[in-house]
Image (cartoon, helix red, strand yellow):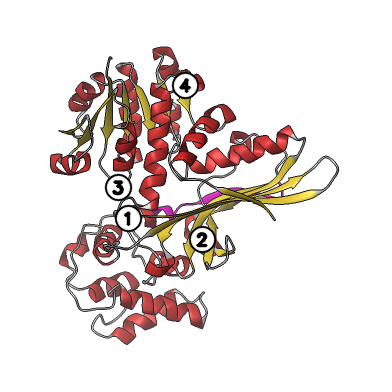
């Protein structure tokens, strides 16, 4: 029996469940490549036919050799590396799988992939990924019964479980919070009543509103990225409202907005940061407060900058700054930018502790119009808790989905053999992934309201 060689780039939190799933097939030989060999060795420990390798994705020579020796490469490194990895894979006629959105740089490789006979599968995580699988399922069912999707809403959040939600930001991290903060500082666009709505990055958190998913939670929701193309991607030209976004616990958008307004989320290098010695000193500098040794002076300046907020929100902001230590005389470990300095600090104070669970909450809401003029609202909801003894909900939902898509590709399953850049936007792609995903205990529950 000829073996199939799989190269997995990256050893972050989602990699282990992906590799574990693929290791079930006796045909698969898996190599996990990471810049730090020890990290890869820990990840592959106990998994059959799986080995660790030291690979730097910044080195095209190392990448080229590793990819050329493989049948498929799974890129689980940060998305900025995907386009180059795909380029090298196409040159070596090796198929690729990523969990990230199809970026313009990835889309530009489509014709090259087709000419080389290479399949490039993307968006097979949770969001994007599982969200597509169940959106397409309902849309296909409604269309097959001559119904129309008039409104579509989809919100997802990776959060601590309610019993472990014990800090003002309502977040915990098993990775750097830098990317999370950056995602909350993006612009957003969506369709509302057949009109395009554009929200600038500076105002994104101001547009977070209460949103009910299931009883027992207190969520705020805000739009995320550019939703407008999804009317076409999902094949619902009849929809007048299409919104995709993120869920956070109440308090998070308010505090994140204050961090942005006061300058703490600035990603540009600051030479003066090298001379800052205390957290209060940095806060004083970015807010132009007169005295870093006087907490009341810092608070007064923060309230001035956040004058848009009411008394209750201001109290939340000040208590949040205090909890994060940004008003303290403790020595700061600077990282070159304000954002990186804050992210490194919170990485220590806001990580998941042993025994704590995360929560992946994802919900679609469809407003349907039937041929007889009747309307109906349906929801499709994933409420997935992590297992402290095994995988987090986020790592399981992303990693296993990616593993399933990869295995279907390797098995030569129908559309997974069509060369080019693809994403799960059709029943032919979504159905087989969804069916196998449900066997792993990951399933969205559908209801008619």
Element marked by disc 2: helix
| Mark 2 or 1, closer to the camera | 1
The first of marks 3 and 1 along the sequence is 3
Per the rendering, the mark at residue 203 is 2
Q: CA distance from mark 3 to mark 1?
A: 16 Å
Element marked by disc 3: loop
Q: Which residue is mark 4?
A: 413
Residue 196 falls inside the magenta stretch: yes
Horizontal and vertical percent position of residue 367: 71, 49
Q: How many marks?
A: 4
Disc 1, disc 4: CB below 8 Å? no
Q: CA distance from mark 4 to mark 2?
A: 44 Å
Q: Is residue 161 left or right of residue 353?
A: right
Q: Which residues are magenta?
A: 181-197
The first of marks 2 and 1 along the sequence is 1
Q: Which residue is mark 3?
A: 13
The first of marks 1 and 4 along the sequence is 1
Element marked by disc 1: helix
Taking depth in this image into account, of 98 and 403 the one nearest to the observer is 403
Disc 1 crowd, CA 10 A, few/some/many (<14, 14-19, 20+): some
The first of marks 3 and 2 along the sequence is 3
Residue 11 falls inside the magenta stretch: no
Q: Which residue is mark 1?
A: 178
Q: CA distance from mark 3 to mark 4?
A: 28 Å
């Amino acid at each position: 029996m000829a073996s199939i060689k799989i190269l997995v780039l990256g050893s972050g939190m989602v990699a282990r469940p992906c590799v574990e799933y693929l290791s079930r097939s006796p045909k698969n030989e898996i190599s996990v490549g990471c810049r730090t060999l020890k990290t890869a060795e820990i990840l592959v420990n106990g998994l059959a036919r799986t080995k660790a390798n030291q690979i730097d994705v910044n080195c095209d020579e190392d990448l080229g050799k590793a990819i050329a020796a493989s049948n498929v490469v799974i890129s689980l490194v940060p998305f900025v590396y995907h386009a180059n990895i795909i380029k090298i894979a196409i040159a070596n006629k090796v198929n690729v799988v990523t969990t990230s959105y199809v970026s313009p740089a990835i889309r530009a490789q489509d014709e090259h992939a087709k000419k080389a006979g290479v399949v490039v599968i993307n968006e097979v995580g949770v969001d994007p990924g599982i969200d597509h699988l169940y959106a397409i399922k309902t849309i296909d069912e409604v269309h097959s019964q001559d119904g129309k999707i008039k409104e579509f809403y989809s919100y997802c959040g990776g959060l601590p479980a309610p019993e472990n939600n014990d800090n003002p930001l309502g977040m915990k991290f098993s990775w750097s919070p830098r990317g999370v903060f950056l995602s909350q500082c993006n612009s957003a666009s969506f369709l509302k009543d057949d009109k395009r709505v554009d929200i600038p990055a500076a105002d994104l958190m101001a547009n977070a509103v209460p949103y009910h998913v299931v009883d027992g939670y207190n969520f705020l929701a805000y739009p995320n990225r550019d939703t407008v193309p999804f009317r076409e991607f999902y094949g619902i030209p009849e929809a007048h409202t299409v919104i995709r976004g993120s869920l956070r616990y109440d308090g998070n958008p308010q505090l994140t907005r204050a961090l942005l307004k006061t300058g703490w989320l600035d990603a540009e290098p600051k030479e003066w940061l090298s001379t800052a010695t205390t957290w209060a000193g940095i806060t004083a500098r970015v807010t132009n407060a007169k005295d870093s040794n006087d907490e009341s002076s810092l608070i007064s300046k923060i309230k001035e900058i956040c004058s848009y907020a009411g008394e209750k929100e201001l109290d939340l902001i000040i208590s949040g700054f205090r909890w994060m230590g940004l008003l303290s005389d403790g020595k700061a470990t600077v990282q070159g930018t304000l954002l990186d300095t804050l992210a490194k600090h919170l990485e220590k104070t806001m990580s998941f502790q042993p025994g704590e669970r995360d929560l992946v909450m994802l919900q679609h809401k469809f407003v349907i119009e039937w041929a007889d003029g009747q309307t109906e609202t349906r929801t499709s909801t994933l409420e997935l808790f992590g297992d402290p003894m095994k995988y987090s909900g986020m790592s399981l939902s992303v990693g296993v989905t990616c593993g399933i898509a990869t295995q279907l590709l390797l098995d030569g399953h129908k559309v997974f053999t069509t060369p080019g850049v693809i994403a799960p936007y059709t029943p032919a792609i979504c159905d087989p992934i969804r069916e196998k995903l449900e066997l792993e205990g990951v399933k969205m529950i559908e209801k008619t309201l």
